[in-house]
Image (cartoon, grey):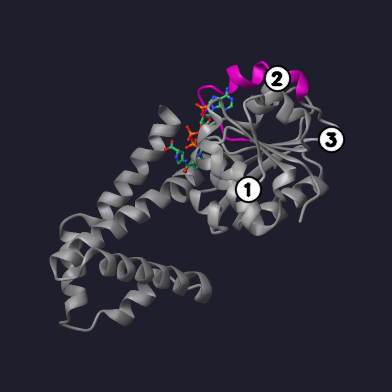
Amino acid sequence: MSSKKIAIIGGGNLGSAIAQGLLKSGFAQPADLTVTKRNIASLSELQALGVQTISDNEAAIRGAEIIVVALKPYNVKEVLAKVKSAFDPKRQVLISVMTGVSIDDLEEIAGAGMPVVRAMPNTAIAIQESMTCICYKNVPEQLVTFVKDMFDQLGVTVSIDEKLMDAATVLGACGIAYALRFIRANIQGGIEIGFDVKTANLIAAQTVKGAAELLIREKRHPEEEIDKVTTPKGCTIAGLNEMEHQGFSSSLIKGITVSYNKIVKG
Ligand SMILES: NC(=O)C1=CN([C@@H]2O[C@H](COP(=O)(O)OP(=O)(O)OC[C@H]3O[C@@H](n4cnc5c(N)ncnc54)[C@H](OP(=O)(O)O)[C@@H]3O)[C@@H](O)[C@H]2O)C=CC1
Ligand SMILES: O=C(O)[C@@H]1CCC=N1
């Protein structure tokens, strides 16, 4: 548990998910957490848990040592310019989860000397199952350890070079949506071959979880595990080959590169 006060600026989809994860993990107590947004009505669940939910970004920043910024990339400059004087590099660290906003930009926004960490989690942070990539420069070792420890309690964390943050966004953060669309397609197929939606949902989701756990726990390559399922002349290889004929892997790879170019080229 941390005794530090945490402010989340921008309590939208990701900001709220981070708040939920911080509370579920016990890393933050409700009284130590403040979440801001303009329309705070949508934060009523967090408020009911004892989290301070306000629209005053300046007050939230002044009262915190850890400032997580989860605003949209296009309004961060405008929003934080109004509260620049609230940042105090001597006692605070700024953690940005925003796509495509560089450490240099963030240092300019928050003022020289402000320790800045960029983090790219995904929405599974709400249930402590995030994949979070982080990068930083000019951040004291002690603060880096603190931030890593925080994200470690919210899932799995890896440190990467800042130049890979856009790629991390696509593979880790957007990846949640891609994985869910894969599961949804399985559900649709499952219904067509006889299951009701609830059972198809459970089978599809647990099967994907099992497949992922085989890779994570056993540190295997997917194809090694696929070889164990594909009986010669069997139904798995027949289905897999048809999926590939229809462009399965190719469409995913193309989607990932389009997503990446959307960040890089706009
Ligand atoms: N969603 C995801 O899965 C991921 C998102 N990200 C990044 O996280 C950031 C947030 O994304 P996401 O949560 O999806 O976006 P949302 O639009 O859901 O959240 C942004 C929030 O900012 C609030 N906001 C806007 N203006 C202000 C202001 N002046 N003061 C305080 N709050 C304000 C908005 O609420 P209101 O209008 O009420 O003020 C809104 O809830 C983005 O930069 C995105 O790239 C990164 C990884 C994953
Ligand atoms: O789609 C987006 O732009 C954001 C970034 C990663 C996930 N959602």
Which amino acid type is shown beneath numbered disc 1? Leu
Badge 2 crowding class, 10 Å Cα cut-off, few under 14, some 14 to 19, many 20 or more, is: some
User: Image check: 194 left or right of 261?
Assistant: left
Task: Specify which label sits upstream in the sequence, 1 or 2.
Answer: 1
Q: Is residue 79 magenta?
A: yes
Queried on whether the Cβ of the residue with tag 1 lies below 8 angstroms from ligand 1, the answer reads no
Q: Which residue is labeled 1 in the image?
A: 49
Check if mark 1's residue and mark 3's residue have beta carbons within 8 Å. Answer: no
Residue at image location 81% in from the left, 28% down from the top = 88
Secondary structure at badge 3 equals loop
Q: Which residue is labeled 2 in the image?
A: 83
Report x, y in % for residue 197: 24, 63
Task: Specify which label sits upstream in the sequence, 3 or 2.
Answer: 2
Residue at image location 79% in from the left, 35% down from the top = 92
Real-space Cα separation, disc 1 to disc 3, in angstroms:
27 Å
Secondary structure at badge 1 equals loop
Q: Is residue 262 above or below residue 198?
A: above
Secondary structure at badge 2 equals loop
Which amino acid type is shown beneath numbered disc 3? Arg
Report x, y in % for residue 154: 61, 56
In the image, which is nearer the foreground, mark 1 or mark 2? 1
Q: Nearer the viewer, residue 44 or 101?
A: 44
Say the numbered circle drawn on residue 91.
3
Badge 3 crowding class, 10 Å Cα cut-off, few under 14, some 14 to 19, many 20 or more, is: few
Real-space Cα separation, disc 3 to disc 2, in angstroms:
16 Å
Residue segment shown in magenta: 69-86
Task: Specify which label sits upstream in the sequence, 1 or 3.
Answer: 1
Q: Nearer the viewer, residue 250 or 189?
A: 189
Residue at image location 57% in from the left, 35% down from the top = 70
Residue at image location 20% in from the left, 61% down from the top = 244
